[in-house]
Amino acid sequence: MRMIIEHISNYREHKQRIILKFSMSRSLILLIAILSSAGCIPQVSYDYDLQEEASLLSRVLGNEPETSIDILALSPEIRNLLDTKINPRWSTRHRLKKLRELLYSEDQLNIHYDAANTLTATEAFNARSGNCLSMTSLFIAAARYVGLDAHFQTIAVDPTWDYDGNTMIRYEHIVATGNLAGGALYVVDFLPEFVLGDMRTNLISDKEALALYFNNLGAEGVVDGRIDDAVLNLRHAINLRPQFSDAWNNMGAAMRRAGEYELAEFSYHRAIRQDFTNYSALSNLAQFYHYRGRENEASRFQERVNRYRSQNPYFHYFHSQLSFQQGDYTEARKSLKKSIRLKRNEPDFYIAMAKIHEKMGEEEESLEMLAVAEKYREGILRAPVRRMNHRFWSMMTIDVNPTKRLRR
């Protein structure tokens, strides 16, 4: 779960607001990023010599000791409960079933989703609630304790735009996954609302999950005005994962809030160096240059942001939805046609087009669009019904290599 901050400024008044998007920190792993071919994105120059880079890195990262926090640590109370309720002689499938019932059924612990805070496994147990990262951490820790295979896995979800159209959000959901005896694969998903779309998945290590935890705490600190806490947590995130582009982007936001403009600029550049498709960092850097009155540099980055945006089918989809809500069906259809040209196999585009045709009294065309949508929906993995505060998949898989599970 990632939480990313993007600044949107009113250039005339230089009034800053922060658009905050939560990844698994509050619900999804929200990534502000652009969907376009990496080969079409020009590299951003990184004009720091070795001496200057070393000095800036030292100032940004400080000399923080290695963190002792373990988000998967279980308290004696939890371990005793698991020892009492879960028999290690049961089959892996039965242990998994009983663990899910113990943690999430209404007549037992009933631990449920709450988007409020980023918590460790034990904190989520004590609170009987947690966001997706917190609940996933608790499940994985408990599953491993009772002898089950369990890992963190991120799943990219098709992006949306914020209402103003300034911020594109790519959701990257986090789930727990593992293998049972006999080669069966299971997935446990805690997000209340989740549409799978294309399954773009990636197993992440416990260390990467810990970096996500600190990244989210850091972003929460920026939003709450606790800049010292934010910087400390983001330092932990980056020290755990030096190439974590989103943590560098959030560090840029923290340093900008602190008035450390040189360090903010460096952090944004560092984010882009680690991931040159990091739309949030590119956009933030453009806004930073506007804020600092460096209009030539701001325009150069903003042009790139606008160019990426124009090639993103979901940006046009957003504008189509906005026009539809305003009753401008002609403009809505025009924007949606651009979306379809850029991505022809997205079922949601055709469903939206069907609604436009229906509003315009074109019933036959509406039915045709629904038929096309259904065609593209074939083969898409559908999320099961949510029960006991989570959704559960169980499927057979031939390839049980943990680096390839759920890859499509």
Image (cartoon, rainbow, N blue to C red):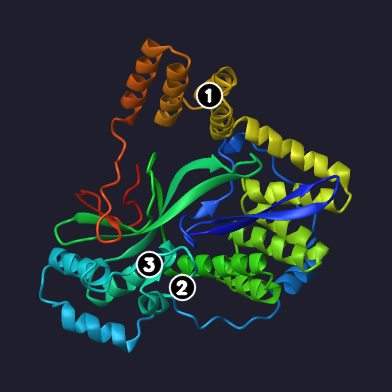
User: Residue 241 occupies which quadrant of the picture?
Assistant: bottom right
Q: Tell me the CA gap for discs 1 and 2.
A: 40 Å
- Kindly identify which residue carries mark 3: 135
Q: Report helix, strand or loop for mark 1.
A: helix
Residue at the image position 39 percent from the left and 76 percent from the top:
127
User: Residue 351 occupies which quadrant of the picture?
Assistant: top left
In percent of width and height, residue 10 lies at 79, 46
- Work out whether mark 3 precedes mark 1 in sequence or the reverse, and give the earlier one: 3
Residue 53 visible, this angle: no
Left-right relation of 130 to 16 = left
Residue at the image position 50 percent from the left and 57 percent from the top:
23
**Mark 3 touching mark 1, by CB under 8 A?**
no
- Kindly identify which residue carries mark 1: 336
Residue 354 visible, this angle: yes
Left-right relation of 160 to 347 = right
Q: Nearer the viewer, residue 48 or 79?
A: 79
Q: Tell me the CA gap for discs 3 and 1.
A: 37 Å
Q: Report helix, strand or loop for mark 2.
A: loop
**Mark 1 touching mark 2, by CB under 8 A?**
no
Q: Nearer the viewer, residue 7 or 352?
A: 352
Q: Tell me the CA gap for discs 2 and 3.
A: 8 Å
Residue at the bottom extreme? 76
Left-right relation of 66 to 204 = right
Q: Residues within 10 Å of mark 2 (few under 14, many from 20)?
A: many
Left-right relation of 257 to 137 = right
Q: Report helix, strand or loop for mark 3.
A: helix
- Kindly identify which residue carries mark 2: 119
Q: Which amino acid does label 3 sit on?
A: Met
Q: What residue type is labelled 2?
A: Leu
Q: What residue type is labelled 1?
A: Leu
- Work out whether mark 1 precedes mark 2 in sequence or the reverse, and give the earlier one: 2
